[in-house]
Amino acid sequence: MNSHQVHFKKIYKQIDAKGDYKFDFNLSKYTWLGVAGSAEIFYIPDNKEELSAILKNLKGDITVNIIGLGSNILIRDGGIKGLVIKLGRNFGTIEENENHINVGSYVPDRILSNYCLKNSYSGFEYLSGIPGSIGGAVYMNAGCYGTEVKDIFLKAYCLDYDGNTRTFENTSDTFSYRKNNIVNNLIVIDADFKKTKGDFQTIEHKMKEVVSSKKTTQPEKIRTAGSTFKNPKKSIGKKAWELIEESGLRSFKMNGISLSPKHANFIVNQQFKSSNMIEDFGEVIREKVFNQTGIMLDWEIQIIGDR
Ligand SMILES: Cc1cc2nc3c(=O)[nH]c(=O)nc-3n(C[C@H](O)[C@H](O)[C@H](O)COP(=O)(O)OP(=O)(O)OC[C@H]3O[C@@H](n4cnc5c(N)ncnc54)[C@H](O)[C@@H]3O)c2cc1C
């Protein structure tokens, strides 16, 4: 055990914590890409109070990272130093109030979407097409087919990395394209969403449309992390996939990594060895697209850890 691990274990015992933790734990099975480095300390807290106590006692001595369902992250081969937190099932509640629905960060987007269908709440249909968790959705301002988190979000309840409670609400500055401008260095524990009554059949129809459109346009049952690059600003007039195709990269392959024949902005990972190779593949794409079109694509996939 290294000094960080000894320190963590001591605090864990001191506060009589109940959550799970593992040292030098490989995170491959927690990412959609199926490859990842290890976490120095991987921790699934039992509850919010325990997580807060751990963070308060660590007093910022150890770097903190948080992962959701791993559908938009690339964890480099060298792994993550410090603490990697994953909120588990205990953070998976859905509770209703008069005007809002409070949802725990662990809840998968599709489960929330189904819950809202069952109870005829509209606005959540698009989440049936996104394979992440609510925590990840709030962090990424996840969206598709013209709706994103900012359209239904009211308020988030968080912990900062020192274990203090923080909240933030939906103002004009909170969200931008695939980005939450507030949430850096915060762990979203749960969030309130607008509760809007709708018509069951209309909601069901919309959800079916989302699911079937995703089936037609995006690859399934492959190791990917969704859209690899963000679409450039609207004035460019082209989406990331169009720039990639225009640059003649549709069938570009490197080290068992390629682009999906169904969607040029989706990486398909067919090797079990290395995250760094995926990053390298993406960097080559960025460079080639830049040389061809003059536009430098930005990663949408969140890249974390050391090479
Ligand atoms: C097949 C496929 C299709 C996809 N389609 C779409 C789509 O249509 N639209 C879209 O927007 N995205 C899409 N994605 C990407 C992805 O599903 C979303 O970005 C999703 O919101 C990520 O959630 P996650 O739980 O998997 O987060 P992760 O990938 O685990 O993490 C993503 C980021 O969120 C942060 N994070 C996670 N949980 C928390 C938390 N509780 N508090 C603070 N930060 C947190 C992480 O630190 C990381 O920076 C797709 C992905 C795949 C694989």
Image (cartoon, rainbow, N blue to C red):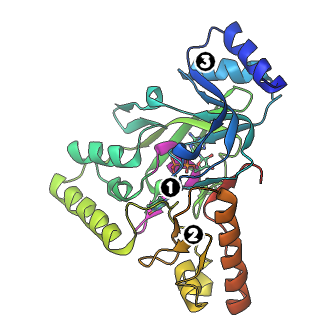
SS at circle 1 = helix
Q: Nearer the viewer, mark 3 or mark 2?
A: 2
> Circle 2 sits in a helix, a strand or a loop, which is it?
loop
**Residue type beneath disc 2:** Gly
Left or right: 301, with 62 as reference point: left
Specify which label sits upstream in the sequence, 1 or 3.
3
Q: Is mark 3 within 8 Å of ligand 1?
A: no
Q: Residue at x 78, y 19 (%)?
A: 6
Q: Position of residue 20 (x, y in %)?
A: 56, 22
Of the numbered discs 3 and 2, the one sitting upstream in the chain is 3
Q: Looking at this view, is 61 or 171 the one in front?
A: 61
Residue at the image point whose x is 44% and y is 30% from the top: 89
Badge number at residue 50? 3
Magenta stretch bounds: 132-146
* Residue 133 painted magenta: yes
In the rendered image, residue 277, in percent from the top left (x then y), is placed at: 67, 64
Crowd around label 2: few <14 · some 14–19 · many ≥20 (10 Å): some
